[in-house]
Image: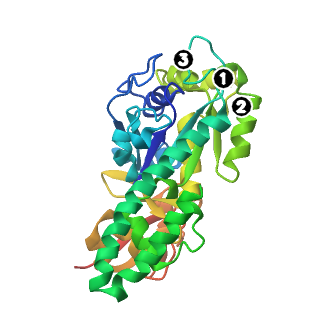
């Protein structure tokens, strides 16, 4: 499985600049006027992982294949987007399939960069986006309720539980409460509706506070406001413009530049780290004579489930997993030494995969 993240925000908050920086492309037009993004931009990006690089060196195989993350950047949303204002509403369907959202918030003053209001106001800006996402969910839910009301007449046992939850969600959204706050997230009817409708307000959110590069080392009032409204949601502070400049540098130049700017971690690394933690994802590794490869799986996944990420046949015909932890592998200096030391464990169907596990799956179909 790979992670898919949608990027949302008002026009001219730095969304497209951030998209270009995170994906190290220039496919998203970034300009100083509203709606310069008129088509959704998508890019698949390799996930940087120093463990994969280390394993590549120790194993001496030709290729190292990272797991990936997909970013989708849509046109800026404005007040009234759910009623057809602006352009962003046309592309909300592009981010319904996303696993999480990055909500970019402008946290700097610059008279030369147009803002939709007189000056940035993170609280109001965030509320505009959240309202439009909620209204879009509400419109979709209302159509679903109409359909369920017809279906329940023919099959009450199947559709009545769905209708009850749909009405509860309708009341919740009308009260300004996002789908993510539904009090019974394990309810089967809720799970079914969320899987089908992919509620925008049901997705985890990372707030990206886009600051001037001079303000990276200390929070300004705008960033403080973002933290307040975000509550428990993660907040990543970055400078989209600075990230865009770093995207053109090689690894050595970037490291030197970050040290001079006082940046400990780049924007992409922050977003991936927060996204993985928020969604409960981990990485494991496989290797053969040609490659070492990283894979993404949900925390708590069993060995057969992890095998299924590689190929459904691996899960269906799972026999056992031969496992060694990353730290143990590195400490022994490679595969041959691991086997010689008897450090390779044999695990069965009940084994829960750990972050950094290096696994060889035995299967038969």
Residue 315 is left or right of residue 126, and the answer is: left
Which quadrant holds residue 325?
bottom right
| Earlier sequence position, callout 1 versus callout 2 | 1
Judge by depth and name the residue closer to the eye, 304 or 205: 205
Q: Number of marks in the image? A: 3
- The residue positioned 52% from the left and 19% from the top of the image is 245
Query: Would residue 312 be seen by someone viewing this image from the given angle?
Result: yes
| Earlier sequence position, callout 3 versus callout 1 | 1
Circles 1 and 2: CB atoms closer than 8 Å: yes
Above or below, comparing residue 58 to residue 224 in the picture: below
Report the residue marked by disc 2.
Answer: 222
Locate residue 108, reporting x and y percent.
66, 23
Circles 2 and 3: CB atoms closer than 8 Å: no
Judge by depth and name the residue closer to the eye, 74 or 41: 74
Rounded to the nearest whole Å, what is the CA distance between mark 1 and mark 2? 7 Å
Above or below, comparing residue 204 to residue 346 in the picture: above
The secondary structure type at the circle numbered 2 is: helix
Rounded to the nearest whole Å, what is the CA distance between mark 3 and mark 1? 12 Å
- The residue positioned 48% from the left and 16% from the top of the image is 32
């Amino acid at each position: 499985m790979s992670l898919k993240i949608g990027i949302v925000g008002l026009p001219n908050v730095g969304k497209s600049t951030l998209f270009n920086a995170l994906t190290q492309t220039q496919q998203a037009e970034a300009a100083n006027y509203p709606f310069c993004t008129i088509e959704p931009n998508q890019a698949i990006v390799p996930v940087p992982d120093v463990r994969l690089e280390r394993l590549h060196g120790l194993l001496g195989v030709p290729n190292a294949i990272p797991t990936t993350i997909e970013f989708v950047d849509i046109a800026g949303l404005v007040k009234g987007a759910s009623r057809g204002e602006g352009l962003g509403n046309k592309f909300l369907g592009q981010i319904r399939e996303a696993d999480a959202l990055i909500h970019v918030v402008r946290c700097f003053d610059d008279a030369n960069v147009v803002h939709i209001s007189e000056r940035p106001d993170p609280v109001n800006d965030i509320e505009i986006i959240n309202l439009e996402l909620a209204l879009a969910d509400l419109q979709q839910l209302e159509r679903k309720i109409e359909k369920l009301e017809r279906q329940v007449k023919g099959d009450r046992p199947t559709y009545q539980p769905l209708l009850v939850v749909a009405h509860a969600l309708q009341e919740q959204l009308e009260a300004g409460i996002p789908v993510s706050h539904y009090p019974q997230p394990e309810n089967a009817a809720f799970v079914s509706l969320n899987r089908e409708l992919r509620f925008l307000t049901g997705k985890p959110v990372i707030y990206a506070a886009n600051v001037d590069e001079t303000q990276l080392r200390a929070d300004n009032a705008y960033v403080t406001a973002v933290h307040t409204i975000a509550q428990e949601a993660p907040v990543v502070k970055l400078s989209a413009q600075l990230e865009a400049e770093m995207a053109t540098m090689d690894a050595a130049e970037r490291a030197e530049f970050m040290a001079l700017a006082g940046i400990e971690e780049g924007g992409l690394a922050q977003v991936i780290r927060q996204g993985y933690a928020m969604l409960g994802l981990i990485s494991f590794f496989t290797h053969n004579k040609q490659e070492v490869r990283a894979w993404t799986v949900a925390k708590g996944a069993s060995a057969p489930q992890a095998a299924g990420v590689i190929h459904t046949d691996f899960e269906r015909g799972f026999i056992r997993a031969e496992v060694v932890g990353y730290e143990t592998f590195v400490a022994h200096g490679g595969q041959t030494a691991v086997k010689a030391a008897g450090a390779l464990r044999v695990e069965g169907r009940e084994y829960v995969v750990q972050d950094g596990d290096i696994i060889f799956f035995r299967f038969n179909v």
